[in-house]
Image (cartoon, helix red, strand yellow):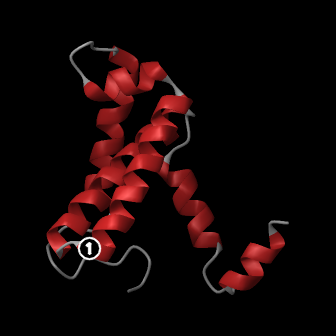
Amino acid sequence: MEPNSPNQFDDHPIGKVFGQLEGIITSRKASKSERSYTSNLLAAGVVKIGSKVTEEAGELVEAAINEVDERVISEAADLFYHAMVLLACRDVTLKQVEATLAGRFGVSGLDEKASRK
């Protein structure tokens, strides 16, 4: 699938939901509602959010090994959400991540990884 191409399963481009979720997370960061899980995570900071990212990554791997696709999808959604909260905590946007990924197209993954050293 080409970058920015529509998702083959629906009429919405991939990224629309991520953009909406990023907006919600950003608004929770600004509003700091005690009744919001997202606001509470953001207030707890990078260490707490990072532990949730680590937990969710482990749950995704475990689901991929032992569970049905629906569980894998659910755990992937949890991981993406928590990763987005972590990015927001650091004031990093999805556009910045997307730009980095776009810059890697046409570059061998092995070469790209070696260039980081």
Determine which quarter of the picture holds residue 41.
top left
Q: Which residue is mark 1?
A: 66
Give the residue displayed 46% in from the left and 35% down from the top. 49
Where residue 46 appears, as percent x and y from the top left, is: 54, 31
Where residue 59 appears, as percent x and y from the top left, is: 34, 57
Give the residue displayed 32% in from the left and 29% down from the top. 38
**From what the image shows, is residue 43 above or below residue 54?**
above
* Quadrant (top left/top right/bottom left/bottom right) for the N terminus: bottom left
Q: What residue type is disc 1 on?
A: Asn
Task: Answer left or right for 7 relative to 32.
Answer: left
Give the residue displayed 42% in from the left and 57% down from the top. 57
Whether residue 83 is visible here, answered yes or no, is no
**From what the image shows, is residue 96 above or below residue 114?**
above
Q: Residues within 10 Å of mark 1 (few under 14, many from 20)?
A: few
Determine which quarter of the picture holds residue 74.
bottom left
* Quadrant (top left/top right/bottom left/bottom right) for the C terminus: bottom right
**From what the image shows, is residue 21 above or below residue 114?**
above
**From what the image shows, is residue 116 above or below residue 9?**
above
Where residue 28 appears, as percent x and y from the top left, is: 33, 24
